Image (tube, rainbow, N blue to C red):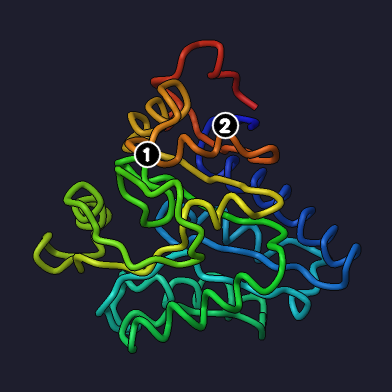
Amino acid sequence: MVLKVFNDKVSLGKAAAEQAAAAIRCAIQDHGHARVIAATAASQFEFLNALTKAPDIDWHQVELFHLDEYIGLPITHPGSFRKMLLEQVIQKTGITRYHLLDGDAHVPDVVRLASAALASAPVDIAFVGIGENGHLAFNDPPADFQTEKPYLIVKLDEACRLQQVGEAWFADISQVPTQAISMSIRQILKAKEILAVVPDTRKAQAVRACFEGEISPMAPASILRTHPNATIYLDKNSGALLSTALQTIA
């Protein structure tokens, strides 16, 4: 695992996008296409904006997989992750091969079809975030580190749901769905490369728990430390509670 800290979320997003774009170009050059997993949330805006502007990517050769989505939330809702994925990535790039998680449809069928598509071939790179409770995708603590299922139906804990209210996607916690479809921890770890984009002060405690505490289901994103090719992108706010040795500004 490599940990990089930047002065602000804009420079963080630009640097992360450069690494992501290079990985996508390399995959296309090596085997004719790139299979990519993408997170969607407020923390990913700067990164995804920079990535979609990156030059010399043949987006028609990119197959995109959705990381997670609420169950029971229509695509018209501002907090819908598939709405964000469409607006932030697909419509900007012209990607034609993508797998959205429709949490408003028959969920067992959605999980089955998405799991089969995802497990059919290796993933070149996964773009993820880390939640305020340390979650990875919607795997809240205590996360399941053992299941091999590509996608899971999970229950969202209160801290996770309050984060969505804090980001202004919902007016209050009663409006936040209690369940979601989430890519599993072990499936995320199967990606050849993982790039985590984690800006903002509100993530600082989770960052410290995940990267200076024990590797534990109680700090789900701590498992990224076991991956041979994971890069964690922080800004000085999200990295503020790390020990001095880990706070080197990139």
Please name whichever residue, 226 or 195, is drawn nearer the observer in this view of the structure.
226
In this view, which residue lies farthest toward the top?
244
Quadrant of the snapshot with the N terminus? top right
Residue under label 1: 217
| Residue beneath the point at 62% across and 70% down | 119
Q: Residue at x 16, y 51 (%)?
A: 158
Q: Is residue 61 left or right of residue 117?
A: right
Question: Which numbered dot is residue 6?
Answer: 2
x, y (%) of residue 42? 40, 56
From the viewer's side, name the closer residue of 42 and 127: 127
For the residue carrying disc 1, how many other residues have a C-alpha within 10 Å: few (<14), some (14-19), or many (20+)? many
Residue 250 point in image, percent of width and height:
65, 27
Tell which circle, 2 or 1, labels the residue nearer the N-terminal end: 2
Amino acid type at image mark 2: Phe
Q: Position of residue 205 (x, y in %)?
A: 33, 29
- Disc 1, SS: loop
Q: Is residue 216 left or right of residue 157?
A: right
